[in-house]
Image (cartoon, coloured by chain):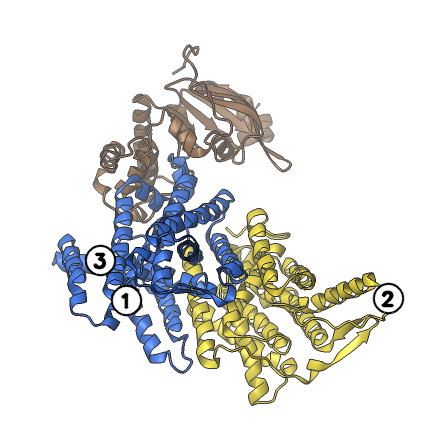
Chain colours: A blue, B yellow, C brown
Amino acid sequence: MRWLALVALVVLLALPAWLNSYAITVFIFIFFYAFLGQAWNIVGGYAGQLSAGHAAFVGIGAYASAVLSAQAGLTPWLGMLVGGVLSAGLGTLVGYLGFRFGLRGFYFVLLTVAFAEVCRIVALNTDAVGGALGYYITFTGNPRQFQFQDNRAYYYIALGLMLVATAVVAAIERRRFGAYLIAIREDEQACEALGVNTFRYKMLAMVVSSFLTGVGGTFYAFYLFSLQPNSVFGIPLSVEIVIRPIVGGAGTVLGPILGSFILSPLAEASRVYFGQGGWAGAHLVAYGLLLIAVVLFLPQGAYPALRRLWLRTAAR
Amino acid sequence: MAPGGRGPEVRVPASQGVSRLDAALIAQSLLSGLLFGGVYSLMAVGLTLIFGVMRVVNFAHGDMMVWGMYLAWLLATRAGIDPYVGFVGCAAALFGLGYLIQRALVDRVVEAPHEMQILLMLGVALVLENSALVAFGPDPQRVRSPLRAATVWLGPVFVDVARLVTFVLAMLLTLALYLFLTRTDLGRTMRAAADNLYGARVIGADVGRVYAVAFGIGAACVGAAGALVSPILPFQPAGGLGLSVASFNIVIIGGMGSLPGAFLGGLLVSVAESLGAVFLSPSMKELVSFSLLIVILLFRPAGLFGRAAT
Amino acid sequence: MSAGPLLATPVLEVRELGKRFGGLHAVRGLSFDMAPGEVLGLIGPNGAGKTTVFNLLSGFLAQDTGEVRFEGRSLTGLKPHAICRMGLARTFQIVRPFPHLTVLENVRVGALVRQPRMADAAGRARAVIEQVGLGAKAGHPAAGLTLAERKRLELARALATKPTLLLLDEVMAGLNPTEIQAILALVRSINEAGVSILLIEHNMRAVMTLSHRIVVLSFGEKIAEGAPAAVASDPRVVEAYLGEAYVAATN
């Protein structure tokens, strides 16, 4: 398995030399959403706390670094850390309220959605950050301002983000933190009886997850150059974040990556075919059907199923 | 949703002072809110029935309502059927949809971990919302009804006939549901299954059918609500989430699984929103709505009448 | 087997423990001590409040009145995980293994509280698994085990936390006589290794053979305490289990 991953990595690193500009944007799309999905995976996959409001963290990170860059001249390379910290702050709040008050399952999902919507509405009504018209970043192409002329720079940054998040998740899985999160997802009360401070570990997962997602917000801002509250805080983005790990395999290291490689091309293809002429929602219909199919037939996601298949064929 | 969003016109005799204006405005909002509350109650009752019987949270509730609205629109524009008549058709169609969804999909996850149920219903919501988007486009629609412009004056306040009819019909539907649950065999079996699933199985109840009918009724409620509301408010596919959240809000306040709670909660929330619209701008009203939801989730998730979800 | 006078600090001191649910006194005025290394049986008819006592001791319920001291330290207000870290572990009446994890992974979770490094914890987990006799099933998913095996797994998980005092809640319920003998021997060996044991059990023969002393609860109150033989013939105990009519009929 290891050498396969290494080969894949080498291929991905070398790929831009052969790809046209459009293909590179598709890969950026794949890597970036794999990154966001991986960050979500920590709290939603491993710890099993379903959050449907992770877009809030993207939005906060995006607006924070964008505004700090425009108003205070702070380079987004540092701004992304500020964005990450602010997102982690919200993550701490949501986590604290949710976990302290014992919200599980449906109630916790609703809490995360409510917070994301509150952020969206506040952004919509705050003229200082553009309100409903949105916030725009002037394109300078200056790398020190996290802007690049060449698409390939974004490709490598997005790939780097995905690898960093994956490394974090792999490290967590190897350690006690990961074992505890998985156990918490299985049965929280039984964990308490075994000496696990479930509140602390869930909070930790939430903080790490929201921090990473917030960092991703900066990439979002300085790749798209325009921030619309409905897009960057909205439910559709939260859905995009959540669906890749779920389809690929929540609670596994490779799940979000696999999910993104499956879903991102699908989304892009449907956008291309149906984008004109008001078929804008078609790829989301496909997402919905896929989600239903995964829940009914492959509840653990594609990766565990593939792994079982691989082990079975390898055993022969 | 902004029950008071159209802005009531109140004619105040010039000689009266400011306080009379406020009182009339408030009375107007109360009345409008109460009348609209029938719709909220219907939505909430549908959701709480599904939860009460099978402990499944219908994340697609608002999107089903959107389809109710669009079906009413289709009936009105293609067949010339007024929504105040057509709501029956919408309810029937949504009943069928709900029944199918339950039998084909939800039935398989009734005993699964909650996360699976949530994700499944989220998937259904995505499909419903975006197929509506594909079919009807993203722009807001409204249904024209002759009752639209009719108003009746009661002293200083006016009654929007459309809302009055909506209220009456919603009340009748809720009453019909109540009678169904208390007077018919199937209804009583449903309540039995909600209270004690094992016991219901022991006495030979066809639980699968009971579940499917319950889900169908829940969907029918919201289909009817959608049709009744379609002449009053503009609707669009993207509105599904807001409607779902509004339903959750009411049901959580009134108590998950409690029908009286859902009913009263609907009236309560509608009146509160109506009053809120007088004093706040529409988007601030949404903010209040979500903030209220957060507060309720933290302090009273079992609601005023309800039992815990797990 | 009598424990004699308690010379060392009791491992557990319970004073006037009380818990109400609405108007119902689930536990009232309960007081008893446990000596280190003792096996104390907690018996009583259904609904006597035994599992409530376990929940109070292990921190899953907060007491209304009274005090509990474990090795001299107060347990009031502590969360279950903190109490486990102090050395008081428990099993659940209805076993709850982590279904998607293997036996080894299950027990490792318990071991991690003392050994934060995964490799060390896995090592300890393997040792405990051997100790309870599940060695052959270490790599099996917990969901596929028989009831008797799951009881052992539950025991192993709690044991992996290196407890000083182990609360066993009906660990023999649902087992056939052979399995009961096996678990009996296992519990005895755990006690002989130095772990104090407080057990709730309905199997009278098992309780009588295993326990040094017995505490009898009825309707939330202690009605008898002492050596097994004495308790068995105590008329109040007989009455609690069999009713006044029986006592009157046989006297």
What residue appears at the point 42 percent right and 70 percent down from the top-left corner?
B104
Q: Which residue is mark 3?
A: A308
Amino acid type indicated by mark 3: Arg
Residue neighbourhood size for the residue with mark 1, other residues' Cα within 10 Å, grouped as few (<14), some (14–19), many (≥20):
some
Q: Quadrant of the N terminus of chain B?
A: bottom right
Q: Kindly state the secondary structure of the residue where label 3 is placed.
A: helix
Amino acid type indicated by mark 1: Ile
Q: Which residue is mark 2?
A: B16
Instruction: Say if C22 sits above or below A267 in the image.
Output: above
Q: Which residue is mark 1?
A: A262
Q: Is residue A174 left or right of residue C80?
A: left
Instruction: Say if B223 sits above or below C117 in the image.
Output: below
Residue neighbourhood size for the residue with mark 2, other residues' Cα within 10 Å, grouped as few (<14), some (14–19), many (≥20):
few
Q: Is residue B87 left or right of residue C131?
A: right
Q: Nearer the viewer, mark 3 or mark 2?
A: 2
Q: Of callouts 1 and 3, which one flags the residue occurring earlier in the amino acid sequence?
A: 1
Question: Of C128 and B130, which appears nearest the observer?
Answer: B130
Q: CA distance from mark 1 to mark 2?
A: 68 Å
Question: Of A176 and B2, which appears nearest the observer?
Answer: B2
For the question of whether residue C232 can be seen, the reply is no
